Structure formats: structure tokens, C-alpha cells
Image (tube, helix red, strand yellow):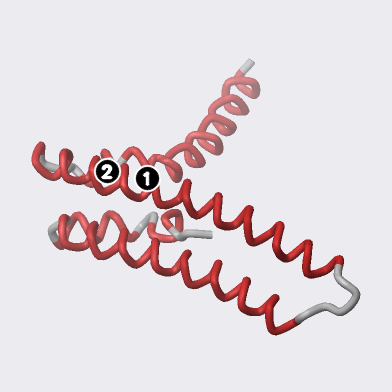
Amino acid sequence: MKFIVISVLFFISLFGDEEHHHRNKELSHLELSKEQGVQMKKILKDFRTELKEFDELKDDIENAKKELFLKENLDIVQLDKLNAKTDSRAREIEVNFLIKVHALLHPKQRERFIYYFDDWEVK
């Protein structure tokens, strides 16, 4: 019986840690003030809108890349331009988001935010 209890606790701690790692997007660990919370909601809403538009852009670019591939001669220059467009837009969205969040948070909150920094990377 002790073995079962210990096993259950072990697995809860494993999966609990995973959930802890993903709590970043709920942002409670930042301990935002009420005003910061309102501002952060706006920042996140804009970020989600940009990500949705980015997903649409990526779909369009994927289709364009497929069309390029189906042609008799593969235009590597055009393929590179399409890839650069995706990369450039991803960086732009990420930088805009980080600039807004950086301006909103005080230094201690920034320290908490960077613990999950890679989770906000636009891919």
C-alpha cells in the first residue's frame, strides 16, 4: 500500500511540475496589480490577434512554397524570400510583444517573466 501511495505522489509531482511549467500564460506568478492586469489583457489580446494573422500568413506561405516546388524549376531565391518573410514577421510579433510587456512590468516581475521566456517565442 505504501508503494502505491509513494508511486502516486511521485507521478503527481512529475505531472504537477509540468503543469507548473505551463502556468506562465495565466501570469499569476507575476502578481500583477489591477491596472497592470487590465493592460496585460490588452497586450495579450493584441498578441493573440497577431498570432492568428501570423498563422494565416504561414498557411499562405506554405501554399506558395508548395506551388514553387511543383514547378519544373525550383526557384530557390523565391523560396528564400518566402522563408524570410515568415521569419521576419515572427520576430516582429515577438519583439513588439516583449517591448510592451517589458514596459509594463517592474524589475521583479521581469525576473519572474523570464523564467518562462522561451514559451513566448513566436514560431
Identified by mark 2, the residue type is His
Q: Nearer the viewer, residue 23 or 74?
A: 74
Taking the image as shown, residue 27 lies to the left or right of residue 54, namely left
Which residue is labeled 2 in the image?
29
Location of residue 1 with respect to 90 vertically, above or below: above
Q: Residue furthest right?
A: 72
Identified by mark 1, the residue type is Asn
Query: Which residue is drawn at the image coordinates 70% and 75% (left, top)?
Result: 79
In space, the residues marked 1 and 2 are separated at their CA atoms by 7 Å
Q: Secondary structure at mark 2?
A: helix
Quarter of the C terminus within the rendering:
bottom right
* For the residues bearing labels 1 and 2, Cβ distance under 8 angstroms: yes
Location of residue 4 with respect to 69 vertically, above or below: above
Query: Which residue is drawn at the image coordinates 62% and 72% (left, top)?
Result: 83
Which residue is labeled 1 in the image?
24
Q: Secondary structure at mark 1?
A: helix
Q: Position of residue 95 (x, y in %)?
A: 34, 67
